[in-house]
Image (cartoon, rainbow, N blue to C red):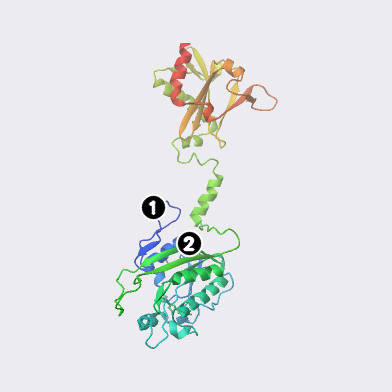
Amino acid sequence: MAKAARVVRQGVASNDLILSSHVGGNEHVFPQILDLYVLPGSRVADVTYGRGVFWKHVPEGQYEVLATDIETGIDCRALPYGDGSIDCLVLDPPYMHSPGGTAHVAHSAFEAYYQNNRANRTVLNYHEAVLDLYCRAIDEAQRVLRSRGVLIVKCQDEVCANQQRFTHIEIAQHCEQVGFQAEDLFVVQRMNRPGVSRVNRQVHARKNHSYFLVFWKRDGRRSIWERPMNAIELMQQIIKTQVPDNRWSGAPLGQFRQIENTNRGRVGEEFVRRYLKQFGIDAQPIAKSRLGVDLAIGDLRFEVKTASEDTKGGFQFNHVRYDREYDYLLCLGVQPDGLVFGCWSKEELATQQPGKLVRMAEGQSVTFKLRRRPEQLLPIHHLPTTLRSLLET
Ligand SMILES: C[S@@+](CC[C@H](N)C(=O)[O-])C[C@H]1O[C@@H](n2cnc3c(N)ncnc32)[C@H](O)[C@@H]1O
């Protein structure tokens, strides 16, 4: 089967939006409507299949297609399907009706192809007969479609007995009456010029467009259409709910979260040391075992605590101790796309100036945790100035 240029939406971001108006053939528009409204794997009944032009560019196997036509003995007004058993129904009956004789001779070309008169003769004539076929087929669609099942109707307006008949509006009105919700409308414009008629003085615009109307079967729930999710989109959505904080994925500092907790402190210390070095401030690492502190800058000793922003948007600096020989506590907060810090002397900590220190564990009074919100900390570019002022006092 030939492949057409079509929009594929398998969870991949695309700028190729599906548009509402198209110049060209039905076979290029129809697959796009399916892409937007009908999940691959759906059971689709095309009840006026004809030559199957609509399906020319739909990859085989993408849908379970039930192709029927009056020509194959199945009337779209009496389908052999159970109630609520179909996901999507496609209806494209003849647009025009010819009662025979001399009236509407322009329709006779349609007759040969559309098979309207032979099987569909009703007591109604002209436009009413066209509409009657649509309406009865829509009633049958209402029966066989499942709740929220999609109905795609192809139609064209017509001027009948000098009267403008907006078929697409009449169809939409009937659909609404029998429990369908109108959801979308596609205009297909013919590429070739419509033939010249024998009308001498033009009264109405000559029609060179037709419609695909999209409806869905209301179910008494919300009347908002929810676009079905394909397998990849659905899986992506479920994965997202399980990822602790997706602000980190793909962010500049996102990989920080992939570092094991025990190594995050070391990364923080190295960052402070090398960052300050670029401003000519020499920070020397100190072996923990001796003093229990991390960095010496000039005469001052610093304990460095590093934390990443948590799901509540704050930082929790763990294992803060009073019994270490540091002068200042330097807290480094890592955000997905930024760094912030706070720096307090031991005295400030003791008087709880940066905030309340809470025991890490019930019953012990050695290690504490300090919670800070980003706005209670400073942007990292203030770090050199802050340290210089500490060193100068
Ligand atoms: C406009 S053509 C459909 C073209 C088709 N969508 C395609 O892509 O080739 C109309 C079709 O409706 C069929 N038809 C007419 N009356 C019908 C009825 N009562 N039930 C089912 N099919 C009918 C005709 O046989 C014809 O194939």
Left-right relation of 364 to 189: right
Mark 2 residue element: helix
Residue 340: percent from left, percent from top: 49, 28
Left-right relation of 21 to 304: left
Could you tell me which residue is drawn at 50 percent across and 50 percent down?
Answer: 236
Q: Which three-letter amino acid code belongs to the residue tagged 1? A: Asn
Q: Which quadrant of the render holds ligand 1?
A: bottom left
Q: Which mark is residue 117?
A: none
Q: Is mark 2 within 8 Å of ligand 1?
A: no
Could you tell me which residue is drawn at 59 percent across and 63 percent down?
Answer: 219
Q: Earlier in the sequence, mark 1 or mark 2?
A: 1
Q: Nearer the viewer, residue 381 or 59?
A: 381
Residue 309: percent from left, percent from top: 53, 33
Q: Which three-letter amino acid code belongs to the residue tagged 2? A: Tyr
Occupied quadrant, residue 196: bottom left
Q: Which mark is residue 37?
A: 2
| Residue on which the image places disc 1 | 15
Occupied quadrant, residue 148: bottom right
